[in-house]
DNA sequence: TATGAATGAGCGTTCATTCAT
DNA sequence: TATGAATGAACGCTCATTCAT
């Protein structure tokens, strides 16, 4: 594995365990098995490392979930697929989940940053379509997106807190309906 | 105003602007107009200052909202009252809002901490009643509470992002229905 | 007990356990059960507190030991009495012992300080007489005094380290002979 | 000279002049002509710096004195050589002398620490032999060692106090006899 | 690319001392 | 005498970042 990747993986683990400010760059390098200085070759500042990691997570979430939405699906089916994929991804990648939670409440986070990402754009397009077709409440698309995201986060947090996995289809559906009902007309 | 209060208010403002780690204790004291050392007279460590502030906010939210719930109200009315009070409180107290968001994604936060607070207990009792009476979905009360809280947060964040206030009753209702629908049967 | 005495006793215990710099004045006051400020009423600075304690110990050592030297005693008997009294005093007053040890290696200690004390003067007179009478080696009296003092300290430290007391007269004598031999002709 | 050595030398001078607690780490670095931070690169804490210095002094004392003891020497000659070497070393290295005095009355010092050092072991072996051969009094070897050490310290302190050096062989011998007599049968 | 020693500003905290009451 | 809140300089230590190699 190349050093840049080693750094990202190690940083994510440490950030998720100890937070951005509880994790010294020197420690990231040490636990990644590389030298102190090389971190700043790949990421000129700690802030840029953090931002690079944000896009890394969003990219992987995009790759993981978008392929699962099939063409002929209904709107609800598509949203369900994306919702489920997001929950699964966060459950399986605990460090990514924690990292994103922290990132979004940190001063690094700017809304514009997120808007630019194709994952968000894909979701917004889907929601816009749903609003036009009258399937969703008359509420700004961005609010609906944020609301579902928040519910994904809440769900994941709850499942983790109780050491649960998504093996019960019945229960999974009920969780999704909760999110769906909040935005469907 | 006594120095302890000055410190709490100043700390909340600075924390909400620059984060816990972006705010030096020396700066809090300076901007509060008190000496460096007195901060540690009232709050032996920075961590304890942060935790004390958490309970300060929860106390004030409790005082603000609980009085508004009147006796004869239906369950939905009570939940609406609490939901609205929470949104209003967070809109009116921007620093408290930002502070709590940061606190809950920080290592200071422990779920048990929150459970002990009477505000949370009050909400859980109400939700439990709703579940027993069959008005809510068959989902753990804590998950419902967390879900509504997340939606309150999302709502507040959205309103602030768009410089909106809750003066349009129609729109306010629509926002609440979104939360309500997600948990009502 | 008056507050001044309480402070001295508490300070001695804390100094002997944690050292001068490991003991905050605020802690001395707290554990003595008096207010923070009153300490500085009796002892304007921490340094003066420490110096006052030094004289307190020397005074008590003087009172304890001098009375035991009887008039008609030979030089060796008198020295033995003083030596034994010093060892006993230090064994019985562990805090005083530790305090003095620290004091004498600290920047507070000035030789002149000690010279002024009647206990030291008494000892020096005795030694001077021994030198004049030819019972002691031709070595400066102050050196002899310091040498015996060092051996008292070493003896006490050794007895404490091995949890011993001076109940074996035979052994006690052997210890004293060690000191005596080092200075007798 | 490398920075680690510069730090040790400067620290020893400052500690001997102003004590451990009267010497700020920042000052050590400044006067050593290195940066503040590098001190903690070599010595993670001030305590470890102090402990490292203790072993540095003991090592140098060992190197200085042991080579002077020649094979065929009698016990008394060997002890004399070590005694003289120790006195000389302490006279010539005033900062080492002061440092050790402070260290041994500080909370850093633990008896076990010292026992492990080869210098101490060498001395104890010699004393043990003297006891077996009946040349020394029937007193624990460790007590004899501590006693001689205390007399070395007393002697050095006395010589320094009076601005004397060991140029008078006659006087030097008399000083040694004082120590020797205290332990010889 | 890569190392790791080196920098130095900054931080949380301590504590002797002062002062209003 | 007595209190204890208040002061503020100082300290040990951290850490993002730089730089010589």
Image (cartoon, coloured by chain):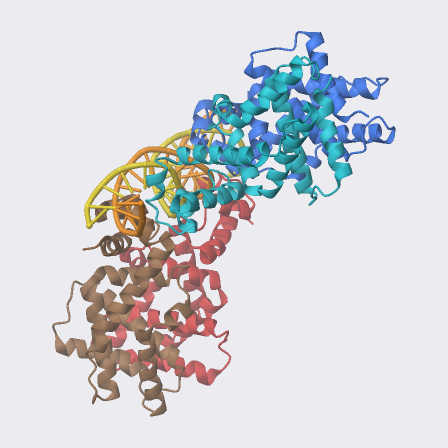
Chain colours: A cyan, B blue, C red, D brown, E orange, F yellow
Location of the C terminus of chain C (image quadrant): bottom left
- The residue lying toward the viewer, choosing from B124 and A108, is A108
Furthest residue to the right? B133
In-image side of C168 versus B108 (left or right) = left
C97 versus B54 height, above or below? below
Q: Residue at x 21, y 55 (%)?
A: D2
In-image side of B149 versus C177 (left or right) = right
**Residue C150: percent from left, percent from top:** 34, 70
Q: Residue at x 39, y 46 (%)?
A: A3
- The residue lying toward the viewer, choosing from A45 and A77, is A77
Q: Residue at x 70, y 25 (%)?
A: A76
D51 versus A143 height, above or below? below
Dividing the picture into quadrants, the one containing residue B90 is top right
Furthest residue to the left? D167
Residue B66 shows up from this direction: no
Furthest residue to the bottom? D133
**Residue A173: percent from left, percent from top:** 75, 33
Dividing the picture into quadrants, the one containing residue B2 is top right
């Amino acid at each position: 594995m190349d050093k840049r990747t080693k750094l990202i993986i190690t940083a994510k683990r440490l950030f998720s365990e100890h937070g951005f400010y509880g994790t010294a760059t020197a420690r990231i390098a040490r636990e990644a098995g590389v030298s102190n200085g090389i971190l700043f070759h790949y990421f000129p500042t700690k802030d840029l490392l953090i931002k690079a990691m944000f896009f890394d997570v969003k990219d992987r979430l995009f790759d993981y979930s978008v392929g699962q939405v099939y063409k002929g699906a209904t709107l609800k089916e598509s949203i369900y697929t994306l919702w489920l994929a997001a929950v699964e991804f966060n459950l399986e990648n605990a460090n990514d989940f924690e990292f994103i939670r922290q990132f979004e409440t940190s001063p690094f986070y700017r809304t514009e940053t997120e808007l630019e990402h194709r994952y968000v754009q894909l979701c917004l397009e889907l929601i816009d379509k749903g609003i036009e077709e009258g399937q969703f409440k008359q509420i700004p698309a961005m609010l609906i997106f944020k609301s579902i995201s928040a519910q994904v986060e809440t769900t994941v947090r709850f499942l983790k807190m109780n050491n649960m996995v998504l093996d019960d289809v019945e229960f999974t559906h009920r969780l999704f309906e909760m999110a769906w009902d909040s935005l469907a007309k």
